[in-house]
Amino acid sequence: MIAQNNIALAEDTKLESPTHWPRKVDIFGVQVSVTDYDELVGCIINSAKTGEPAVVSLFAVHAVITASDDPELRRKVNTFNAIGPDGQPVRWAMNWLHRTKLADRVYGPETTLRLCSAAAEHGVPIYLYGSTNQVLERLSVNLISKYPNLQIAGSESPPFRKLTEEESIELVERVHNSGAKIFFIGLGCPKQDHFAYEFSDRLRCVQVAVGAAFDFHAGTKSTAPAWMQRNGLEWLFRLAAEPRRLWKRYFVTNSVYILKLIRATIFGSNSR
């Protein structure tokens, strides 16, 4: 059971080293972690406090299909310490294909809040990387308002292109000098996952790719109602809000996801 591996955050004496990351199952060639909020947050906090660099990402349907269809991206993300099942359809597939009995998904925005709460409690500094300066300012204010003891060691909006080597070196120095132990990445899929892999052996902290969580918690985008989230309809809410930008993502990837799930049911979970 997942609960047997949970790390109790209330007592520092229960922190372990090295971190025991949750097991993974194959979803269309992508290794997704069988985990819940408590276990994943516990693993991240433990890794941050014991100084173990790690990479964690949260995958909804779009991310799973993108990685499944891209051999290079799939190779990269399958090296991550954990990939949480962000979307309900991903959880359903894990339960259907592997009998994991997961009761809930591990939603990126919710994971972000739970991590910030735990980081504030344990004195673990965080760093915010992604989006725009305006979003980061609002996000920082909102997080500090919600968690007064949270230490935001730094935040920055990167250029909308790949960093040069000089810029990469400077970023690593800034993060290291800030003392941050958790590095939140809000660049969107697949950019944030390519970034996390590239810096996995350079940043001495836990990288956590959380997608649109920055915008949601900054208040610049709205989240779907709880009933839509529970029933795997968040994509429909976001599509209605941004139809021109998201129609292709959801109609194409959702269709491909269903076809892959049918194929995996017949031929095996690692079918692509």
Image: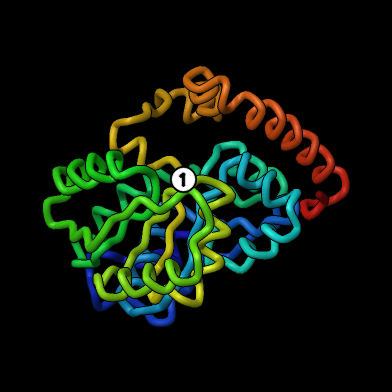
Image coordinates of residue 176 in percent, x first then y, are 31, 75
Nearest the camera: 159 or 231? 159
Taking the spot 22% from the left edge, 63% from the top edge, the residue there is 153
Taking the spot 76% from the left edge, 40% from the top edge, the residue there is 261
Is residue 119 at least partly visible in the picture?
yes
Q: Residue furthest top?
A: 240
Taking the spot 31% from the left edge, 66% from the top edge, the residue there is 8
Nearest the camera: 12 or 78? 78
Is residue 1 at least partly visible in the picture?
no
At label 1, counting other C-alpha atoms closer than 10 Å, the crowd grade (few under 14, some 14-19, many 20 or more) is many
Image coordinates of residue 94 in percent, x first then y, are 65, 48
Residue labelled with disc 1:
211
Image coordinates of residue 132 in percent, x first then y, are 35, 43
Taking the spot 34% from the left edge, 64% from the top edge, the residue there is 182
Q: Which type of secondary structure does the marked residue at label 1 adopt?
A: loop
Nearest the camera: 23 or 112? 112
Identify the image's colour scheme: rainbow, by chain, secondary structure or one colour: rainbow
Q: Classify residue 75 as left or right of residue 126.
A: right
Q: Classify residue 137 as left or right of residue 145.
A: right
Image coordinates of residue 31 in percent, x first then y, are 65, 59
Q: Is residue 246 above or below residue 137?
A: above
Q: Is residue 124 above or below residue 34?
A: below
Q: Classify residue 70 as left or right of residue 126.
A: right
